[in-house]
Amino acid sequence: MTAIEFENISKQYRLGLVSTKTLAHDITRFWQTRILRHEDPYLKIGEANDRSTKGNSDYVWALRDINFKVEQGDVVGIIGKNGAGKSTLLKLLSQVTGPTTGTIRARGRIGSLLEVGTGFHQEMTGRENIYLNGAILGMTRQEISRKLDEIVDFSGCERYIDTPVKRYSSGMMVRLGFAVAAHLDPEILVVDEVLAVGDAEFQKKAIGKMQDVSKGEGRTVLFVSHVLSSVRTLCNQGIVLDKGTIFFKGLAEEAIDTYLNMDKVSFCDENHYDVRIYNKNLKINKVSINEGDTNVLTLCDKKSVTITIEGKTAIPLNLALEIHIYCEDGSQVGTYSPAEWEGRQYLNVLGDFTIKETVELPETLCNGAYYMNANIIQLYVENLATITNLVKFTVTDFSSSITGAMFNNKYFGNIMLH
């Protein structure tokens, strides 16, 4: 059974203004549509929603000709670049704003987690805000009282539940807001970037709750996130938006692959590592390993690899390096994420830049062969570039040497960047 249907949905905004309405435009619309019985003239103008370029029109289409259906029980991941129209799509479904054209049909109560914690009163306690926020979301007082203990337990904020929320951290606010909204028991759950704020424990709990809602209770979930691992774990269907239009719709895994390969620019180095750039504002000029020209190494007694990446950005970016280590059969045996270390991000980079990091290899390596891939990421937002086969090395005697050769592995261990 179809739970949600978007039919010819478009949303137009006028740049620089709170609304599109002016007296002159209203008179023109009235004359054309009511007197002459013509189509609204402002629907014929406007440009695609490309945030990175200067437009020639005061009107922009945040969404244009959106058509898709969601079946009951489906978990649909909506992904795309910033400004692609993802949040606008969810706001239309949640009736925060209305479409310029088209019709949306939804069966059942909709629970929206668009800006979790919105409506919290800073001077009120967590307990009081649960009742306030629950009422805003459409829950009755009896329903909130019945679920209060469950909401508090899920939030993990029991110790501070009778403390004014002005003393809460941003993470605690998100936890409490999500806990209230997640227990609304809607037929359709709409989630926008909630997991980007919480810690690893909260993200795991939130994903588990959404899985229970969709799989265990047969409810429908629309999930927007730039955290692709969460989309891969949670969703069975995917939609990729680009400049306000649907670029792809299908299985979640295929949607993720499509998104990662949009606007892809790639080149292969003579040493057989492959650089793929996904953002046109980033350029990579040179990659070197241990300040040398080869990425197949004989390290002898050295237990570290120094990676240097030189490039250029056209706009300010917050850059960081993410390292993944694989064995011969392609299974991942180690990873290092920027979220796990402090002071190693390259913030507000504009123009020429150099990223230089040293991977310290542990002494507990088994005999075998390994290779490293790296991602250059826009911090907490998106993957900007991928370098595959960045470093190739083989452990022949983990007590004395690491040499470049062919591959075979069992275990890698912990990785540390300094």
Image (cartoon, rainbow, N blue to C red):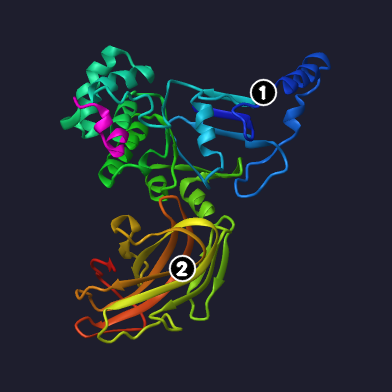
Residue located 26% across and 67% down the image: 416
Q: Position of residue 233 (x, y in %)?
A: 37, 46
Quarter of the picture containing the C terminus is bottom left
Q: Quadrant of residue 5?
A: top right
Residue located 22% across and 81% down the image: 398
Q: Is residue 138 above or below residue 278?
A: above
Circle nearer the N terminus (1, 2): 1
Residue type at mark 1: give it: Lys
Q: Secondary structure at mark 2?
A: strand
Would you name the residue on which mark 2 appears?
Answer: 387
Q: Position of residue 265 (x, y in %)?
A: 58, 64
Examine the structure image and report whether residue 169 is included in the region drawn in magenta: yes
Q: Secondary structure at mark 1?
A: loop
Q: Could you tell whether 61 is left or right of 269 in the image?
A: right
Q: Position of residue 413 (x, y in %)?
A: 23, 67
Q: Could you tell whether 400 is left or right of 241 in the image?
A: left
Residue located 76% across and 18% down the image: 27
Which region shows up in magenta? 162-174
Would you name the residue on which mark 1 appears?
Answer: 21
Residue type at mark 2: give it: Ile
Residue furthest to the right: 36
